[in-house]
Image: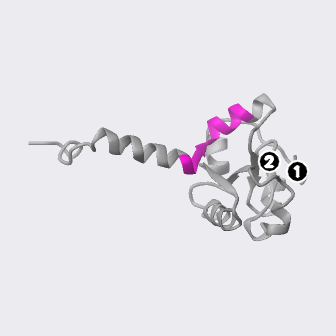
Amino acid sequence: MPSLVTEIPAADLALVEAHYAARLAFETDCWDVHEVMSRGEPDFVLLDVRGPKLFERAHVPGAINLPHGKMTERRMAEWPEETLFVVYCAGPHCNGTDRAALRLARLGRKVKVMIGGMTGWADEGFAVAHGLQNA
């Protein structure tokens, strides 16, 4: 008798490949963002989409505070059209990243979500910055 794990067969390998390639097109994680940011030459703009008070308390070093409600065509014009934006919020319990990603897509901007947000960042033990300054 199959177990709870094997009672439903694993997906065809081509489907597995397509699924995870698609998922990685939408998401990145805290470890990968940290790795790139620590090198000092990110090829994306990191946006903290929480409110200014939470940003001031703690944020990912190098992030810019830009809540999704402030993402306008005029504001986003500060960056070249080909810019990739990586967005994060408080953590998995927060849909701010989803709102920000949707807003950016509607503005014609490339976007990925940093899964885990600040909760994931803290879980990894990475340093945080404080204050209202934007990178």
Image quadrant where residue 56 sits: bottom right
Most common secondary structure along the magenta stretch? helix
- The image position of residue 62, as x and y in percent, is 82, 43
Which residue of the protein is positioned furthest toward the right in this rendering?
133
Q: Locate residue 40, reporting x and y percent.
A: 81, 32
Residue located farthest toward the top when viewing the structure as drawn? 39
Q: Which residues are magenta?
A: 25-36
Amino acid marked by disc 2: Ala
User: Residue 120: within the magenta?
Assistant: no
Residue at 44 percent across and 44 percent down: it is 20
Packing grade of label 1 (10 A; few <14, some 14-19, many >=20) is: some
Residue 29 on the magenta segment? yes
Which residue is at 63% across, 51% downward? 112
Q: Amino acid at mark 1?
A: Asn
Could you tell me which secondary element the residue under label 1 belongs to?
A: loop
Label 2: element kind = loop
Q: Position of residue 35 (x, y in %)?
A: 69, 31
Q: Which residue is mark 1?
A: 134
In the displayed structure, would residue 5 be above or below residue 87?
Answer: above
Q: Does residue 84 lie above or below 41 as drawn? A: below
